Amino acid sequence: MLGKLAGAWLGGKIAGSNKGAKGAILGYGAAALARRSVPALAAVALGGWALRKWRRGRRARAGYPDEATPSSPAS
């Protein structure tokens, strides 16, 4: 309901002085696009956040064998 009202308002703003079906069509298209893209965008953002958190945790727990550390040069 609120999405349809917001879409109608947005369509009216886009159409400007060209009243009629053009504003209604644009408003409906904007509401449909928001309904489909916002959940997908939220899912992508949540997935990116989880991946970043997992990689940072994995990097913090990285353990290296003693052979991998550089030894002091022999004098």
Image (cartoon, helix red, strand yellow):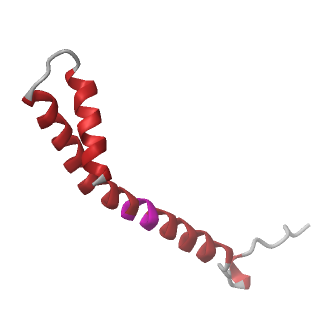
**Residue 43 horizontal/vertical position (percent):** 37, 64
Name the quadrant containing residue 9: top left
Residue reaching furthest to the left: 21
**Residue 42 horizontal/vertical position (percent):** 40, 60
Residue 23 to residue 47: above or below: above
Camera-side residue of 29 and 19: 19
Q: Is residue 9 left or right of residue 49?
A: left
Camera-side residue of 64 and 46: 46
> Does the stretch in magenta take in 6?
no
Q: Is residue 37 left or right of residue 64?
A: left
Camera-side residue of 42 and 65: 42
Residue reaching furthest to the top: 17
Name the quadrant containing residue 67: bottom right
**Residue 4 horizontal/vertical position (percent):** 24, 48
Residue for point 11% across, 36% down: 25
**Residue 3 horizontal/vertical position (percent):** 29, 50
Q: Is residue 22 left or right of residue 56?
A: left
Camera-side residue of 8 and 62: 8
Quadrant position of the C terminus in the picture: bottom right
Residue reaching furthest to the right: 75
Residue for point 14% across, 21% down: 19
Tell me which segment is drawn in magenta: 43-47
Tell me how many marks there are: 0
Residue for point 38% across, 61% down: 44
Name the quadrant containing residue 45: bottom left
Residue 66 to residue 28: above or below: below
Quadrant position of the N terminus in the picture: bottom left
For the stretch drawn in magenta, the main secondary structure is helix
Residue 8 to residue 17: above or below: below
